[in-house]
Amino acid sequence: MKKWPLLAAGALMVAALCMFGCSSGQPQTATDGGSSSSSSSSSSSSSSNDTTAQDNKDAATDEIALITPGKLTIAASQDFPPFENLNTNGEVEGFEVDVMKAICEEMGLECNYLPTIKFDSILPLISAGGKADVGVSGFTVTPDRAKEIDFTDVIMDVNQGCAVKKDSGITSVDQLAGKKIACQSGTTGYEWAMENVEGADVQAFDEMTGAFAALDSGQVEAVIADLPVVQYYVLNAYQDCEVIAEMPTGEQYAIIVSKDNPALTAALNDAIAKIKANGTYDQLTQKWFGA
Ligand code: ARG
């Protein structure tokens, strides 16, 4: 698998009109008055005529406890392009969204995203149960989190990245000592900044949009977060900023599931293996991150 994805022009075009979550309060560039022809993102039930295959899927999913039968209810913080982001049509889109649609199709389930949820609320929500079946939000596998929830098999590899204003004169993370850094609360980026930047004033934001707005306005001197996301924000919205560093944290994303639902984790792992084996996963990697 590619480790340091750069965004393909195609993915940029798809995403350029629709980033930076509608919940952020940022001005949006939407110009359409309802002329969009984008199709709904939520329906993914199998169109297979093969009743035996469908029966098998139903038999497999029957044993799994789901919030709503026939649907996989998904919690996500939709501020995280290119993984999950709310577009101007109010649809969630991104690499992980496409992966979840493919997984749901394998499982014979409808893919049902809840409205965006603050990142640091998702894990408690999944662990408490009753609201969502899974959390899919660029969740890095960590031993601490694994005490609270179960992780599926890995669906993505990332490192941390750091962005600053181009005219800041800052060229390495060493120069951030004692400076203000914006991170998203509850993330591995926040932890990295706390542990690795001496005397830093690390400020926690609910959403990535807030972290970048703070950098843009001069409230902080750097943003530290997952590299593909930092790259995306800089390329698409903050061109007076630049990515100055990649920190090789070797993180891996997985889906989070309640510890009370091991059958669901097993079924998700099965579906992940299938979409990796049948080429779907590679197609989606290509679509969102290029060659
Ligand atoms: N990978 C990081 C973590 O697990 C950041 C994830 C943030 N996700 C989001 N959708 N905002 O902590």
Image (cartoon, grey):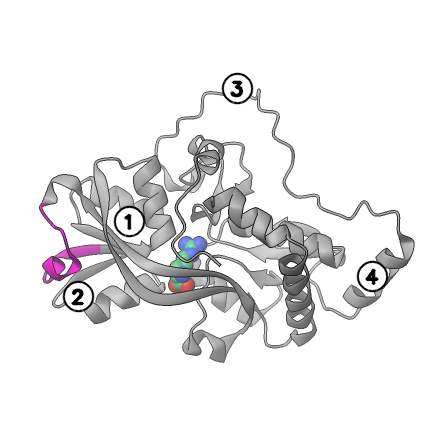
Q: Is residue 67 left or right of residue 250?
A: right
Q: Is residue 147 left or right of residue 210?
A: right
Q: Is residue 260 above or below residue 112?
A: below
Name which residue type carries label 1: Ala
Q: Is residue 71 visible?
A: yes
The magenta stretch spans residue 256: no
Q: Is residue 247 left or right of residue 86?
A: left
Distance between mark 1 and mark 4 Cα atoms: 43 Å
Name which residue type carries label 3: Gly
Ligand 1 within 8 Å of the CB at mark 2: no
- Reading the chain from its start, which is encountered first: label 3 or label 1? 3
Q: Is residue 42 above or below residue 10?
A: below
Residue placed at 63% from the left, 76% from the top?
A: 260
- Reading the chain from its start, which is encountered first: label 3 or label 2? 3
Name which residue type carries label 4: Asp
Distance between mark 2 and mark 1 Cα atoms: 17 Å
- Reading the chain from its start, which is encountered first: label 1 or label 4? 4
Q: Which quadrant of the view contains residue 8?
A: top left
Distance between mark 3 and mark 1 Cα atoms: 29 Å
Any mark on residue 211, and which? 1
**Residue denoted by label 2:** 197
